[in-house]
Amino acid sequence: MIARDNELLTRVGPGSPMGQLIREYWVPACLASELEAGGSPMRLMLLGEKLVAFRSPDGTVGIMDHACPHRCASLFYGRNEPGGLRCIYHGWKFAPDGQCLEQPNVPEKNSFAKRLKADAYPCAERNGVIWVYMGKRETPPPLPGIEATLLPEDTVSLSCSLRNCNYLQVLEGEIDTSHFGFLHGGSVKVEDLDPDDLNSLSLQDRAPRYHVGKTEAGTVYAAFRETADGQLYYRVANFLVPFYTQFPDGVFSHNIVLDAAVPMDDEHTMIFTWMYRDRTAGVRRLKDGSPIPGLECNEEYLPNGTGWFDRWRTVPNEHNDYLIDRDAQNRRSFTGMTGVQLQDQAVVESMGAISDRTKEHLSVSDNMIVMTRKRLLALVRAHQENTPPPGVDDVEAFQQARSGAFLASPDADWRDAYSEEIGKAYNPTGVLHLKRERIS
């Protein structure tokens, strides 16, 4: 990739082309559980903007510039009172929508509170997530129609995790399927796998072949391997604009999952993960019933702090080398690190704050990454010419995507095989009726 394209894709601050594109969409801001009614305001970094988020005593959520529009003191230190947030410097009070309510140090005849608003953004709360719209539209578009975000909160596992690197590195790691056979399962010997576990094919054949294509709302890949009886075992996954991915590690019919690589700024990302509780994950055990070394769950977090980047930090991190165990790496674990998420975190953060993609040497296994970069570049450039990006108004474009593993005849075109699975797929909660995916 040439340097100027890398710059175009990775910079997300105010005024940047990619930042402007992302601002067309509603953005996950935080978990609803992070804001207590009448509780302390929270520092929130999003798209390079320093914001403050709070929930007023009546439950209304506000997200606004952390700098008070009077003298720029931080509203993080503000008093969360009925009706809004009061700056501790001079007592000016602001409603969740930014409207100034009181200027108590100004004589009433000189007050201009009715004409003053703090820079605030529209907020919405749905199924355990607080969303914010940071774009220019006076009337925000609909909330995204992605399947996992529409499931009732009690049917989904919701989580967040900080990554100290650019969002594109995180996103590209999620659509790089062949790394599973190495980073996560590289220590496994084929003879130790359960031959009756179809998903073990992802470790029996670590160099799958690929199909990739464009969709209405992003890109899709189908990694495929031949089974013993001559069928094709597919692992299909999607990228959805502007920063969503659906990973394929599960049985297609119930694999309702989603990752959002939300840019905090150019060098920090917050991953939001939705996972349907009744999904069936991919291969996790050997034929003797023991867990695959290194895939044990190990998601330990430090206590959340109050700094801009002090939320959802893992205990193993770059400062302690992700607690890598070199002895375990030599004897039983390919990485010496425990947990899929931690292994992913280590490699994407090791690329640096913003990866220098001019140094890459890509192969056919990277075709999905190449196509996704081209897709994003085309969308950013079209947006600079005032073309609305996909999925902003037509939220149904997102409803036509799901990921996961399935079997198909080798005589069937992969697009048709995937569309057939979409047609058969169902949402066990009855929230959605999926449409056939259109792939080019």
Image (cartoon, helix red, strand yellow):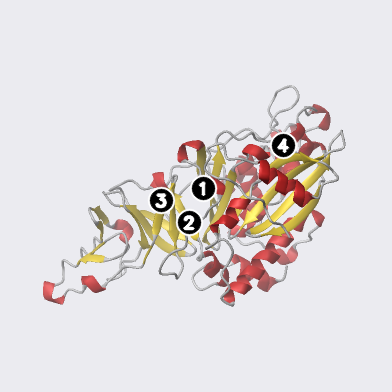
Inter-mark Cα distance, 3 to 2: 10 Å
Label disc, if present, on residue 143 of the rendered structure:
2
Would you say 85 lies left or right of 266 here? left
Q: Nearer the viewer, mark 3 or mark 2?
A: 2
Query: Which residue corresponds to mark 1?
Result: 149
- Identify the residue at image location x=86%, y=45%: 411
Would you say 36 lies left or right of 411 here? left
* Figure check: 170 above or below 405: below
Q: Nearer the viewer, mark 4 or mark 3?
A: 3
* Figure check: 7 above or below 87: below
The answer to whether one can see residue 179 in this image is no
Q: Amino acid at mark 2?
A: Leu
Inter-mark Cα distance, 4 to 2: 44 Å
* Residue 333 picture location, percent across and down: 71, 35
Q: Are marks 2 and 1 in contact (CB under 8 Å)?
A: yes
Query: Which residue corresponds to mark 4?
Result: 329
Inter-mark Cα distance, 2 to 1: 10 Å
Inter-mark Cα distance, 4 to 3: 43 Å
